[in-house]
Amino acid sequence: MYDITGDIKENGTFLLNCQWKPEELDKILPAKAKRDLANKHVNFYIVDAISIAKSLGLGGRTNTVLQSAFFKLANIIPADEASEYMKKAAYKSFIKKGQAVVDMNYAAIDAGADAVVKVKIPAAWKKAEDKKTKAKALKGRKEVVDFVKDILEPVVAQKGDLLPVSTFLDRADGTSPQGTAAYEKRGVAVDVPCWNPENCIQCNFCSLVCPHATIRPVALPESDEEKVKGMKLLPMTGLAGYKFGVTVSVLDCLGCGSCVQVCPGKKGEKALSMVPAATQQKEQQYFDISYKYADNPEVLAKFKPETVKGSQFKQPLLEFSGACAGCGETPYAKLITQLFGDRMFIANATGCSSIWGGSAPSTPYTVNKEGKGPAWANSLFEDNAEYGLGMATAVNQRRAKLVEIITKLAENESLAAPAKEWLDAKDDGKASVPASEKLIAAIKAAAKGNKSREFASLCKQALAMEDLFIKKSMWIFGGDGWAYDIGFGGLDHVLASGEDVNIFVFDTEVYSNTGGQASKSTPTGSVAQFAAAGKATKKKDLAGIAMSYGYVYVAQVAMGADYNQCVKAISEAESYHGPSLVIGYAPCINHGIKKGLGTSMLETKAAVAAGYWHTFRFNPLLAAEGKNPFTLDSKEPTNDYKEFINTESRYSSLNLFFPERAKVLFDRAEQEAKEKYLKLKKLADQ
Amino acid sequence: MYDITGDIKENGTFLLNCQWKPEELDKILPAKAKRDLANKHVNFYIVDAISIAKSLGLGGRTNTVLQSAFFKLANIIPADEASEYMKKAAYKSFIKKGQAVVDMNYAAIDAGADAVVKVKIPAAWKKAEDKKTKAKALKGRKEVVDFVKDILEPVVAQKGDLLPVSTFLDRADGTSPQGTAAYEKRGVAVDVPCWNPENCIQCNFCSLVCPHATIRPVALPESDEEKVKGMKLLPMTGLAGYKFGVTVSVLDCLGCGSCVQVCPGKKGEKALSMVPAATQQKEQQYFDISYKYADNPEVLAKFKPETVKGSQFKQPLLEFSGACAGCGETPYAKLITQLFGDRMFIANATGCSSIWGGSAPSTPYTVNKEGKGPAWANSLFEDNAEYGLGMATAVNQRRAKLVEIITKLAENESLAAPAKEWLDAKDDGKASVPASEKLIAAIKAAAKGNKSREFASLCKQALAMEDLFIKKSMWIFGGDGWAYDIGFGGLDHVLASGEDVNIFVFDTEVYSNTGGQASKSTPTGSVAQFAAAGKATKKKDLAGIAMSYGYVYVAQVAMGADYNQCVKAISEAESYHGPSLVIGYAPCINHGIKKGLGTSMLETKAAVAAGYWHTFRFNPLLAAEGKNPFTLDSKEPTNDYKEFINTESRYSSLNLFFPERAKVLFDRAEQEAKEKYLKLKKLADQ
């Protein structure tokens, strides 16, 4: 994809990090690279930093290995001295993550220097010839294909600066087409999941938790079986006439392994395992086919979309985001798009979610087969709730106009019945869909038959507003830096307004995107920027504040701890005709989870088991029925609070640098967590 | 004060609103006015709109009477038509306040036209001669006197535009001296309170509630009795050797009568009554003398400053503000200055409190005999909490430096004891005062005796920071528009910070200064701008939100409902070494209290009795002792909620325009109030 040898100087040195052997390179390297290396008499080395890092326990972190290899080859300072400097630097950088991490890096420094392999460049490379391959025609909506060809491809090839301003004429309004991230196909994962049908119980957890939407179940009508020859399939449990398969987008997967972590498997054997990506390239075709079988009404009649399993038979309308591998935020957003994406607006606060949600030139928000997907926009860090309220107000105003028109049209006999049905259903997310289809069809038919000019004009006006018939799902997305701090004044104002908007907070307990500054969501004792000695004040009770209004739907969820509760809370929030706030616990690269971010789902589960996080729902509709609006979903904590927090370096590092303070703060944090649980328990029991 | 006849045209018409008789005018009018009227052959009329308005029940509202008189004299349109137009306009303007108010205005229109009296101008007025009076020398601090002479006097005489820019050179930093409002002496009250010692029980309530600090008790040493000949005095209850008097600043009083309203008197006879201001001019001298006897340590030893009675023997450091007569906000602010004003910083949010708190060119915040008073500033509407936190941070940083110096000085034997005493007491508002005095004196003495250069330098540095020895009382003032809405994000951030700042919210439940827009503090059913049909959502639970932090001192007070609780809450808030939030219920001109704003103290009492407002305190120190931090101070409501709200036109007007909606909203508001009480009761009982 990139021209990485073009800038090498005559007699320069080139080090390639790869898992290939020297003798494989002739087949693999592009002709341009071969010619550059040969003609410029380059000293060519390879190193398998990937395997070394993995074997040392560093996972995908190859930087230390490569740094050591670099110093070995560059020979700027004597090798011994370089090694010593690097080790000192590694200590400084990593001691806050524990001595074990430091030791791994020491080993990586030693290994990196020894692992470089000189490659002899064959003379034939001087005249290596480019393969004549036909440029693959891009498939998709014309708007997207044009955008990808004209803008995305040059920009991702780092040639964006060469584009003339005129290229952007069609984008002068600041919009860009959805679904462009799907054209990147970066193929960056070293290992990807491989499905073993034998151990699969068809739970769809793998798909639910995937941060990047790269693993999906397929419910294939048996009649189509021969169209997908070679695809691994199982008889589908609970739905006769269908086969079940799990497909992986090998080229989009980031290799976090979250799917494998949560796979329950059978008899202790998981149905998924991580295997080298190179072995799975042929699986891509089945993934590409999977789109065709998503959103099948017959499948969704059996497996309801508002369930964990059923939701995964709907196409995610957020796919292939560039979030950290294992990100705790994107699974929530992806799920929400599966539930409501085809009629959804999103106002997105600045922060991680605005970066993985819309990194120019590509966007992961996409559309379904009908061309429907979330309308997404980002304004500022400090005004996102207001921005979303503005979107909702605009939609409300425009729909009020539509209601006026339909009310008039209802006077016409031929439209009376469908108009009434629509007027009754218009504010119901589900019921408004068939009612809208019926009414639109009726108006189209009536417009043809009726000769009154006024009637024709009303029909025309109504049809011009076709996009407004179905109830919209208005969402406001943001992180805790926004919701608890910078945007809180607006968030509070929007909650107080009583308007029908839905707010989802990706709670990483820290400003994630800007490098980990403490927010008011950061709990006592957590180390963060601006709280280097551990935060001294406790986590703000955002849910409690929202509940104080009484007319706000409020929930706390933790996907990995309780999939069902998560789907239920999000569904209830969306259907509530008033403000809703759902706060989702989202593990983050800044937490320093010692087992790696690929275990983020297990981490949320552990957080709940230790009483670090609680899941609950506050539903004002229950209060209206005279019931207790508050339901505590998570059980009484069974695990040790301090043991849990010490599995994350954001806490454990405090023991290293401020052991006495750590004791005080961790004691207090544990006490606060206990008090929090008792408070919630009391709410639930009243 | 003003030249009001200078611009009259030849043969013009001049109408003067006054209570004088035609024959009294020769003695009363200034020579300049007489010459103008006579030489320009003016048609001169007088009207006693004050007496007419009062007799019709309009209180001080003379505008309708004067309007009618104007149309009678101007003769622009036939008198009958004019009357009809005026009555239509009066209906439109006042019907929302009820038919009774409309009827009063009808009567005023009829009366105004008939009440004008033509004055015959004596020929002698043509040559009326100015009295040769010596300009009274202004007393006070030079800085203030200069400011008053150079800036305040020209500006209040409406000649500010004539001032050259150079006049403001000394004020280029934006500061102005405190206490300038005392030089205005506007004399605008028609009636002022008159004290009848016979019925006085020396409770000091009159002084506590006075919004303008114009009525004050004096504890006079008997030895000084002959210095105040003619002053009404009583033997002082509970303090031998002292006489007790109540003094009134006749020229600063706004005539609201709040003091009379709250006076308990004896056997049903009040000790205060409102009488014509003209009869009380001689009382001003005793008020002027009262300053001398304020802050007397002997008196304050008997009557502690943190009590209702004792606090009133301290000089208010907020005096003669131009707030509405009867304002519900200023009594709180005034009390706070009596308690902590001599070591106090105030960051003031934009709103009414920034207007009565600092209306250029005068400011009501003032200093005591020692020259100590609140440092006051106003930044923006949206950043006041942050502004106040900045002030606190600056003081903390500077005091930290001082602690460093004193810690070094403590190594010197002669300073060891006083330095230790100060280091122990420095964060205690009370104890830091004597400790500071002692240490400063010791440093001054030590600096003379010791020859070490380093020691001398340290002493010099310490003495340069003399203003920082005493613990500062950091306050953040603002209304509900600021605290609940526009500044809430910052307020929440400051509360969460854990810093030692005190926040007082003047809760008028509406944006007062900008004309009555609904805020999130506005309760269900209240009519306001942006909520013309009554607010549909309930009052935000600001106290509940603040309590959710656990480490914030929180109180709700209502001065007129419980003086003691109010003083206690404010004292506790100030002494708490963390963030404090006190929310004070403040009746406002925008409430349309039917009995007039002079009854604002009774109105807060009625609000609490009806369960419309509750008083309570949440003290984190109690939680630390294992006790319930929450105390519900107000009793179970005994009066009817709806009856109460209908005494204010902000509610009752909804009955007129939207009677059905009023029923729904008032039912709901009553229900919400009940639920609120139960919630607080539960908190108190746990």
Image (cartoon, coloured by chain):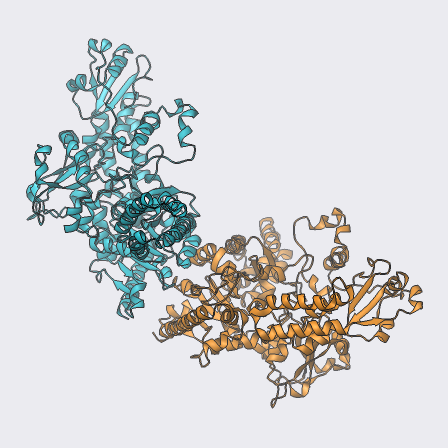
Chain colours: A orange, B cyan
Left or right of B322: which side holds A292? right
Does residue B399 sit above or below A515 in this rendering? above
Count the labels in the image.
0
Does residue B446 sit above or below A188 in this rendering? above
Rendering coords of residue A493 (x, y %)? 44, 55
Q: Nearer the viewer, residue B537 or A332?
A: A332
Q: Residue furthest front?
A: B451
Left or right of B69: which side holds A410? right
Rendering coords of residue B101 (x, y %)? 25, 40
Where, by quadrant of the figure, is residue A89 drawn? bottom right
Where, by quadrant of the figure, is residue A21 drawn? bottom right
Left or right of B610: which side holds A193? right
Rendering coords of residue B85 (x, y %)? 32, 31
Q: Residue furthest bottom?
A: A267
Does residue B110 sit above or below B259 in this rendering? above
Quarter of the figure that contains the C terminus of chain B:
bottom left
Could you tell me if residue B519 is visible in this image?
A: no
Could you tell me if residue B222 is visible in this image?
A: yes
Quarter of the figure that contains the N terminus of chain B:
top left
Left or right of B606: which side holds A428? right
